[in-house]
Image (cartoon, rainbow, N blue to C red):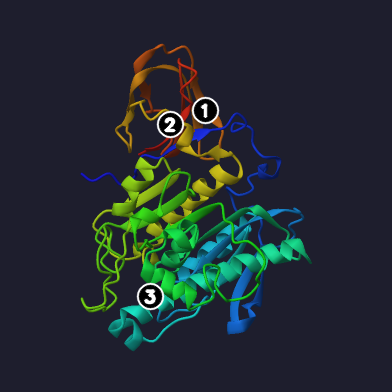
Amino acid sequence: MRKIYIIVLGIFMAVALKTNAQCLAGRYSTEIFSGVSLDSVVYSTPYSLKMDIYQPTGDTLSARPLILLAHGGSFIGGTRENDATIDSLCLRFAKRGYVTASIDYRLTDIVSLLTDSTLAIDEVIKAISDGKAAIRYFVKDAATSNIYKIDTNNIFIGGNSAGAVLYMHVGYLDSIGECPSYIVTAMNANGGFEGNSGNAGYNTKSKAIIDLAGGLNKVSFVGPGDKPSVNAQGDADAVVPYTCGHPNLGLPASVPVTLCGLGSLEPVYDSNHIYHMSHVFPGDGHVPWGSDPLKFNTVDSLVTVFLYSLVCKNIASVNEVNTNTELNLFPNPAGEMVYLKSSQTLSDIIIYDATGRSILQVNNINRGNFEINTSRLSKGVYFIRIKFSNENNSPVVKRIVVE
């Protein structure tokens, strides 16, 4: 049986077990605000593009994390107002204490998309330019009028379907030097690497990516030290291929546009030690959460835990992990028992629930194998922090699901 939940690696920094003061009282993990305000603004003056900004009503925090999301629609349709997945996520996360925004971006016509690879690539680059301008809009606001009170060190970007493709490329293309020639050509025709959609002079830095049925043109865009990501996709997705392939957007074979989904990206995240969380929906096609409330809640919970781990727990990159250490945890999802097998001697383990609360600690293990009885744990997501006897090996965190 295919694993639904994929093991995720990360490490805690020395301060990782200290909860950020702004994360107390359930902020960012539960919907603590009952109301949300909504503003519609033009963020790209050159192209009259709008976004809807959601803010928790009555929030007094002076520096808040931002989530920027883009809608689906195959780059030929959709708006910030008609993608139910994006709208619902914006509402829910605003109630948890984030500022959220849903953006429009430039679209193309179906004839251009279907008949000309140059025009198809040009459209995606235009959309990437728009996504960057949306980030800069908030960075500019934080540096000037500070209307939205954004913590610019905690900006998260992502989207659904085409919107995820858009922001995956914003997040993982670090410079024009790593772009293939056809992307360089399209960028140069649209204002260069930073684009021409406005708010020039401000940066487009983001902390992590929310990838819902998106993908990358090339998996090589992901490398060591890149951003964390949270990912969800059906493994029978043909619109955005689960593995690298020709997207089923009606494109003829003569239009050589390739997209690589989660099935191809997951091993690249692992090999480059990118902190990530992923959920695969076995047998499902494109955006199954769009029509199934239970699957949407799975996605919502996954993104909630992922963002909380970055905003509140200071989970660092896994680049510091000794790659000579072999560490396996199985089965996952777990039932009554979980088994740890390590090539290095284990020292201590601590199990945390999804809110960061310590629920079990075992010290002085002094062996490479260990069994954990999970029969008394409630169903849900947990994190196991594993410390090794050799202090040169950084602690590791593994995510498990108890069913």
Q: Amino acid at mark 3?
A: Ile
Q: Quadrant of the C terminus?
A: top left
Can you give x and y, in whole percent of width and height, for residue 144 in the image?
78, 65
For the residues marked 3 and 1, what is the alpha-carbon distance in whole angstroms?
50 Å
Q: Quadrant of residue 370?
A: top left
Q: Quadrant of the N terminus?
A: top left
Residue in the picture at 41% in, 48% down: 223
Can you give x and y, in whole percent of width and height, for residue 298 in the image?
41, 53
Can you give x and y, in whole percent of width and height, for residue 31 in the image?
60, 54
Residue 49 lies, with reference to residue 218, above or below; the image says below
How many numbered marks appear?
3
* Secondary element type, mark 1: strand
Disc marking residue 126: none
- The residue that mark 1 highlights is 359
Q: Amino acid at mark 1?
A: Ile
Residue 37 lies, with reference to residue 59, above or below; the image says below
Residue in the picture at 29% in, 53% down: 264
- Using the image as rendered, state which of residue 362 and residue 101 is in the foreground: 101
- The residue that mark 2 highlights is 377
Q: Quadrant of residue 33?
A: bottom right
Callout 3 environment at 10 Å: few (<14), some (14 to 19), or many (20+)? many
Q: Amino acid at mark 2?
A: Leu
Disc 1 + disc 2, Cβ < 8 Å:
yes
Tell me if residue 105 can be seen. yes
Tell me if residue 336 can be seen. no
Disc 3 + disc 2, Cβ < 8 Å:
no
For the residues marked 1 and 2, what is the alpha-carbon distance in whole angstroms?
9 Å
* Secondary element type, mark 3: helix
Can you give x and y, in whole percent of width and height, for residue 358 in the image?
55, 29
Question: Closer to the camera: disc 3 or disc 1?
Answer: 3
Residue in the picture at 32% in, 58% down: 261
